Image (spheres, rainbow, N blue to C red):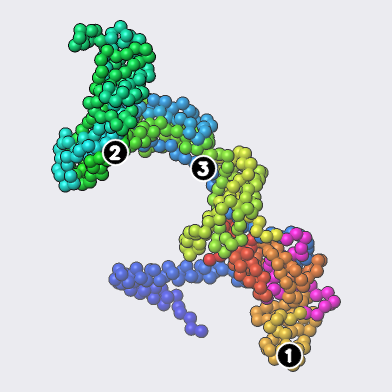
Amino acid sequence: MKYMQISDITGKIKKGGQSFKAMPRKKKIIFISIAALLLVAIMLLLLSPSEKVQPKNTTAQVTRGDVSVIISGTGTIKPIDEYQVTSLVKGEILEATFEEGDMVEKGDLLYQIDSSDLENTLEKAQLSLERSQLSYNQTMDDLDKLNVKSKYSGTITETYVKVGDSVNNGTKIADLIDLKTLVLKLPFNAVDAESVHEGDRAQVMLTNSFYTLEGTVTRVATGNLISADGNTVRTVEIEVQNPGAVSKGDMATAIVGDVACNSPGTFEYKLETTITAETSGKIVAMHYGKGDLVSVGNIVAKLESANSDNTRRSSQISLRDAQLSIDNYNKQLENYQITAPISGTVLKKTSKAGDTLDNTNSSTVMAVIADMSTIIFEMSVDELDISKIKVGQRVSVTADAMENKRYSGYVDYVSVVGTTQNGVTTYPITIVVEKPEGLIPGMNVSAEIVVDSRQDVLLVPVSAVNRGNIVFVKDDGKATPQPAEEEKPQAGNKAPQPGEESSQAGEKTSQAGNKGTMGKGMTVPDGFRAVRVETGLNDSNFVEIISGLSEGDEVYVPVSAGSGTNTMSGMMGMGGGMPMGGGMPMAGGMSGGRTTGMTGGRQR
């Protein structure tokens, strides 16, 4: 080896220092950075341990116990129904006769707001409606006059118009006479007339034929007249039904009781009238003609007006518009009385009597009412677990604010609408808490839902089960190792003997008591044998063994030096339905960001 003298080293250092000083500033920075990185690397190398910590291994016995598959999560307590009371109108609050903490029933009056301005507007609208109603009624009456009706019953003796004629108000349409009823007006002595009354029966005798008819007194005059012969008389009218042979102008006398008239009188028709048009229009139909009998209300002629339909429609629109205004104002008036929308407890009251609601604060929350009879909360469930959740499942609930107290509940609703975030989809479920004494809105709670469980079953630690459902059992010499499925020989081939090469996998097994291999990358520990087991449910600590092991068997449990878990337990922690080896389902338990009761939940 060639050694360098101190003077040479010193000279080189001086020379190097001069060279460094002569370097450009940019190169100096690069040089210093490289030197710093080398220094850090050297320090890390010196501080790293020279030997790796070797993992420690333990054993466990196959025991009996219970195992459950639990889906857990968190949520925030809230009432089943909560309502924020707001106002749709503005004005001064006149009444607010309730306080926070009060129980109110649905429909109870909460706030009375001053509605005097609206009431004045409503009164004006009601007056407008009355005017519109009167106008509408008049319009309909005028339109009804296009139907020329008979006001009496009788016989048409003459018509004056025909279809196509234009008529005005007052135009004669037809003459009408009641031929069936005659009226006889007779003078009676004034003194005798005092004993004659309306309704009395009368015997009427025709002067020309002495034919007798029965009649009825319909009127007795209250005043006296002087007859042509100078007697004081009163007029008595007698109504007679025409038998068909009596005509207007025929003469007759009458006796009422034992009183006779002073002189004969002449018959007149009870009704002689002319039917006239009461509005203008064009005749489009004549329903009756000369000689026809008509009754009261029969339409004799029908008129048509060019503006009748428009007039009717305009009147209907005006009336409807006025009615809608009234309905609208009445609806608005209801908003000035704010009632409780639900039955419940007043949680908050922010507005009181004397406050004024205006355009800037009319949407302010005035009070909050909640139905505290039922307490619920929502919890998010992972997409891999949502199929396990059913309505009615029992739920165990704990609250952070209520230590050492556990509540019961049940799943009330399972949503089919999920939310996806960072590639993970979760679904909300609603849980009802039974007997929620002490719980108030806003409290945070945790929930556990047992979706499956087994009691009094064989259990081994999760980390004791390897790939392919292989468990290493303490070899007591009573049984031979059970090879993994891939190591079993095919039909017609000889099974590999201990120490021989396997034609199927090319792997070796050891003599009894010596270390060997089982499958690719799987080493059988000294003093143990490999056994394939059938597994059932598992939680975060234990796996159910259906077959392959017996109670009291001692199994190999590897423990990592750093984390205390082995590779297999980490694999099982990838649950959510992932098969382990021979098909052991590992159910995930991550819900709402919290994983308990299941092996690791779902990892991404």
Which of the two discs, 1 and 2, labels the residue nearer the N terminus?
A: 2
Q: Is residue 292 left or right of residue 167?
A: right
Residue 43 rendering spot, x and y as whole percentages: 51, 67
Q: Quadrant of residue 5?
A: bottom left
Q: Amino acid at mark 2?
A: Leu
Q: In whole angstroms, how far apart are the C-alphas of marks 3 and 1?
A: 69 Å
In this view, which residue lies farthest toward the bottom?
A: 492
Task: Count how many numbered circles sit on residues in the image.
Answer: 3
Tag 3, which secondary structure? strand
Residue 69 colored in magenta in the image: no
Q: Nearer the viewer, residue 253 or 503?
A: 253
Q: Is residue 76 something that shows in the picture?
A: yes
Residue 286 rendering spot, x and y as whole percentages: 23, 44
Query: Residue at (48%, 83%) from the top-left corner?
Result: 2
Q: Which residue is mark 2?
A: 293
Query: Residue at (70%, 91%) from the top-left corner?
Result: 503
